[in-house]
Image (cartoon, rainbow, N blue to C red):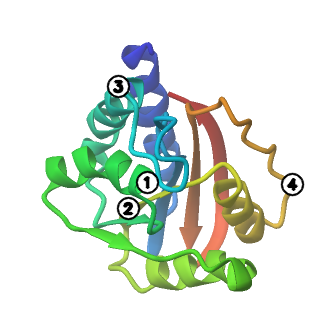
């Protein structure tokens, strides 16, 4: 991972997104980091995943998120932990319910829109939930995240809870 290029990309995204003012929110959507193979039902992060979680924390700490949302699975929470520790906030777990999966993006959006104006939030999800959240919010097709793809970061800028800008980056 080239943190110099990644840091520049995130900083550029923040500068571009900073052009919008009043009642705005910037949301960073990230898939959980690399996971271990065992246990199959709820694996922790692998060594590479732990390193990626640290890189993510380093990249996003200056964005000073006021909220970090994860699913109930430990791989999302372990990905979020270094960032939460770095900025001194608790992780908010929003469980994914497969029966109500289509409501999940709206639940997160409502939570983010209830945050203070001009604040940032991070959502750490899964290869299927991150594109679904972005697509639901932007009403645009979002390229799926491959099973072995852990370096995508989608950045969405909301103004008055309406998407005004989105970026698809790598870190």
Q: Earlier in the sequence, mark 2 or mark 1?
A: 1
Kindly identify which numbered label has been placed on residue 47.
Answer: 3
Alpha-carbon span between mark 2 and mark 4? 24 Å
The image shows residue 8, relative to residue 86, as above or below, that is above
Residue at 26% x, 51% y: name it. Answer: 81
Alpha-carbon span between mark 3 and mark 4? 33 Å
User: Residue 54 falls in which quadrant of the image?
Assistant: top left
Does residue 160 show up? no
Task: Give the secondary structure at mark 4.
Answer: loop
Image-based side of 45 in relation to 9, left or right:
left
Q: Which residue is mark 1?
A: 76
Q: Crowding near pointer 2: few (<14 within 10 Å), some, many (20+)?
A: many
Alpha-carbon span between mark 2 and mark 3? 28 Å
Q: Quadrant of the N terminus?
A: top left
Of tags 2 and 1, the one toward the viewer is 1
The image shows residue 52, relative to residue 104, as above or below, that is above
């Amino acid at each position: 991972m080239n943190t110099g290029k990644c840091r520049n990309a995130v900083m550029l995204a923040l500068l571009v997104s900073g052009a919008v003012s009043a009642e705005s929110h910037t949301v960073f959507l990230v898939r959980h980091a690399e996971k271990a193979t065992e246990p199959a039902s709820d694996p922790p992060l692998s060594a590479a995943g732990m390193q990626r979680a640290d890189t993510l924390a380093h990249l996003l700490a200056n964005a000073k998120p006021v909220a970090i949302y994860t699913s109930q699975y430990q791989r999302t929470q372990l990905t979020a932990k270094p960032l939460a520790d770095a900025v001194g906030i608790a992780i908010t777990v929003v469980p994914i319910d497969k029966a109500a999966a289509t409501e999940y993006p709206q639940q997160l959006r409502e939570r983010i829109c209830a945050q203070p104006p001009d604040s940032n939030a991070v959502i750490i999800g899964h290869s299927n939930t991150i594109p679904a959240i972005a697509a639901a919010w932007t009403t645009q097709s979002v390229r799926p995240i491959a099973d072995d793809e852990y370096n995508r970061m989608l950045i969405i800028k909301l103004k008055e809870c309406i998407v005004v800008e989105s970026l698809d980056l790598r870190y």
